[in-house]
Image: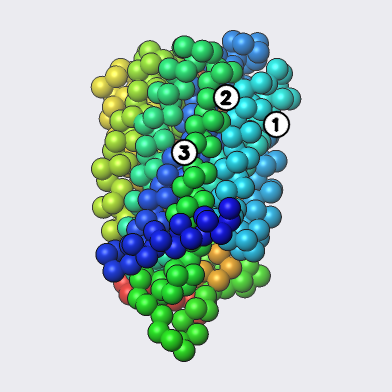
C-alpha cells in the first residue's frame, strides 16, 4: 500500500515537472490544512459558547476559564511537537495530528461536565490551533524563500475560508442536530478533507524531489545544495530577536483570540442579534481573503519590523472598534478592520520564524514560539470573560489590552534585527 502511494505521488510530481513549481501545490495543501484546523479555532468555538452554557449549566466565565486553563496546559506540549516535526517531517506529523483532530472533535462533542469540556478544549487547541497550523507553516517555509511572504499569505486563505465557513456551518449544525452532533460531523469532515490529500500529494521539502528552495534544480554533484541552514534552538535563544518575536506572538495570539472568542458574546450584548454577530466572521474572512496576497507581497518587500508593527497597531484599533459597535453597520466596519488583522497575522505566523532563524531547526524554534503564542491565547480571554460576567461588558478591558499592542509595536521597531549568519532577502532588514 505504501509503495502504491509513493508511486502515485511520484507520478503527480512528474506531471507537474516543467509546468510549474511544485511548491505552489504544497501551498494549496497547506491552505487546506489551515482550513481544516477550524474545529480547534476560536471563531468556531464562538458559536458554541451559548448552547454549551445552556446545555451544561455553565457560566461564560466558567467556559472561558476552562478554555484558558486547557489551552495553557496544551501549549506546553508544542515544543515537543516541534521537535517531532523536525524529526519526522511535516507530512507524517500532519497525518498524525489530523487523525487525532477528528477523534478530539468527537470527544469534545460528548462532554458532560466542565472537566470533560476542559480536556476537550486542550485536545482541540493543541491539535488544531497549535500543531496543524505549525506544521502547515513549516511545510510552506521549506519550499519558499524569496516569495515566502506571498506563499504564506496564500496559505492563510485557508484560515480565512475557515472563518467564513466554520461559524456558519456550526450555527447550521447546532440548529439542525444540536451542538454534540455538530462536533461529530466536524470530526468526520476533517478526516474526509485532509487524509487523502496528505497521503497522495505532499513532500516535506523541495530537496526530496531534486529541487532547491524556490524551484531551481539541483545539479549532479551539488550535494551542498541539499544542506539546510539556520540556527539551532539553543542558538536562537541567545538572540534578542527570539524574545521580541515571542513577545509579539504572545500579544497578537492573545488579542486575536479574544476578538474571535468573544465576538458573538460582546456584540450581542451591544445590540446585535447572535446570527448577525456570527455573520460578521464572513465579512472578516472576505476582507482577509481579498487583502492577504497583497499583504504577503508587503512582507516580501518592506522591512519586517515595520510590517510587524503595522499589524500590532491594527490589532489595537480592532480592540477599540469592537467596543464601539452598536448596530450591524458598525459591526461591518469593525469586521473589515479585524479581517485586516487576520490577514497580517496569518502571514506573520509562518513567516517570522524562518525569516529570522532559517530552516534547519525550524520545527523546534516554531514549537517554542508557538507555545508562547498559545499561552497568550489562553490568558487573554480570562479578564474579558470575567468583566462580561461581573459588569456586563468587556469594553474597558478590551481598551486596556489595546495599549499592550501599541507598546509591542514600538519595541519591534526599535529593537528587532536579524541574527548574524541567517540568510535574509534584500531590503527586509
Q: Is residue 162 left or right of residue 353?
A: left
Q: Is residue 403 left or right of residue 94?
A: left
Disc number placed over residue 184 in the picture, else none: 2
Marks 3/1: CA distance? Answer: 25 Å
Question: Which residue has dot 3 on it?
Answer: 193
For disc 3, the neighbor class at 10 Å (few under 14, some 14 to 19, many from 20) is: some
Q: In this view, does 313 lie to the left or right of 372?
A: left
Question: Which residue has dot 1 on it?
Answer: 119
Residue at 65% in and 11% down: 57
Does residue 143 appear in this view? yes
Residue at 55% in and 71% down: 360
Do the numbered discs 2 and 3 sit on residues whose CB atoms are within 8 Å? no
Marks 2/1: CA distance? Answer: 16 Å
Q: Where is residue 103 in the image (x, y as percent from the top left)?
A: 63, 33
Of tags 3 and 1, the one toward the viewer is: 3
55 or 312: which is nearer to us? 55
Q: Where is residue 187 in the image (x, y as percent from the top left)?
A: 56, 31
- Which quadrant is home to the C terminus? bottom left
Quarter of the image where one finds residue 52: top right
Dot 3 or dot 1, earlier in sequence = 1
Residue at 59% in and 18% down: 180
Residue 152, placed above or below residue 209: above
Q: Where is residue 29 in the image (x, y as percent from the top left)?
A: 42, 50
Dot 2 or dot 3, earlier in sequence = 2
Element type at mark 2: helix
Marks 2/3: CA distance? Answer: 14 Å
Residue 331, placed above or below residue 194: above
Amino acid at each position: 500500500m505504501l509503495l502504491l502511494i509513493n508511486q502515485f505521488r511520484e507520478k503527480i510530481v512528474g506531471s507537474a515537472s516543467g509546468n510549474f513549481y511544485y511548491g505552489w501545490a504544497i501551498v494549496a495543501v497547506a491552505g487546506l490544512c489551515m482550513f481544516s484546523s477550524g474545529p480547534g479555532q476560536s471563531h468556531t468555538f464562538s458559536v458554541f459558547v451559548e448552547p454549551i452554557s445552556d446545555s451544561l449549566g455553565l457560566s461564560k466565565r466558567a467556559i472561558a476559564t476552562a478554555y484558558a486553563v486547557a489551552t495553557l496546559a496544551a501549549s506546553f506540549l508544542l515544543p515537543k511537537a516541534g521537535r517531532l516535526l523536525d524529526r519526522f517531517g511535516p507530512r507524517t506529523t500532519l497525518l498524525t495530528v489530523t487523525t487525532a483532530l477528528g477523534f478530539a472533535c468527537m470527544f469534545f462533542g460528548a462532554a458532560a461536565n466542565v472537566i470533560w469540556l476542559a480536556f476537550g478544549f486542550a485536545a482541540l487547541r493543541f491539535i488544531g490551533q497549535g500543531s496543524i497550523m505549525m506544521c502547515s507553516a513549516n511545510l510552506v517555509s521549506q519550499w519558499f524563500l524569496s516569495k515566502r511572504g506571498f506563499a504564506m499569505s496564500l496559505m492563510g486563505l485557508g484560515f480565512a475560508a475557515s472563518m467564513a465557513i466554520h461559524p456558519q456551518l456550526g450555527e447550521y449544525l447546532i440548529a439542525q442536530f444540536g451542538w454534540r452532533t455538530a462536533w461529530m460531523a466536524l470530526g468526520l469532515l476533517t478526516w474526509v478533507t485532509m487524509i487523502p490529500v496528505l497521503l497522495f500529494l505532499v513532500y516535506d521539502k523541495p530537496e526530496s524531489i531534486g529541487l532547491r528552495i524556490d524551484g531551481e534544480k539541483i545539479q549532479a554533484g551539488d550535494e551542498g545544495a541539499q544542506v539546510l541552514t539556520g540556527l539551532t534552538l539553543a542558538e536562537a535563544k541567545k538572540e534578542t530577536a527570539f524574545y521580541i518575536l515571542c513577545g509579539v506572538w504572545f500579544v497578537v495570539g492573545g488579542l486575536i483570540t479574544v476578538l474571535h472568542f468573544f465576538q458573538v458574546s460582546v456584540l450581542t450584548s451591544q445590540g446585535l442579534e447572535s446570527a448577525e454577530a456570527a455573520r460578521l466572521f464572513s465579512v472578516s474572512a472576505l476582507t482577509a481573503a481579498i487583502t492577504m496576497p497583497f499583504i504577503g507581497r508587503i512582507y516580501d518587500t518592506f522591512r519586517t519590523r515595520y510590517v510587524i508593527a503595522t499589524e500590532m497597531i491594527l490589532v489595537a484599533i480592532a480592540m477599540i472598534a469592537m467596543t464601539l459597535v452598536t448596530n450591524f453597520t458598525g459591526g461591518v466596519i469593525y469586521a473589515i478592520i479585524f479581517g485586516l488583522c487576520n490577514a497580517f497575522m496569518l502571514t506573520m505566523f509562518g513567516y517570522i520564524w524562518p525569516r529570522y532563524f532559517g530552516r534547519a531547526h525550524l520545527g523546534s524554534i516554531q514549537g517554542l514560539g508557538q507555545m508562547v503564542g498559545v499561552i497568550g491565547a489562553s490568558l487573554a480571554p480570562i479578564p474579558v470573560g470575567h468583566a462580561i460576567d461581573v459588569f456586563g461588558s468587556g469594553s474597558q478591558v478590551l481598551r486596556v489590552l489595546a495599549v499592550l499592542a501599541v507598546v509591542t509595536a514600538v519595541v519591534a521597531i526599535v529593537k528587532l534585527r536579524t541574527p548574524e549568519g541567517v540568510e535574509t532577502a534584500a531590503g527586509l532588514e
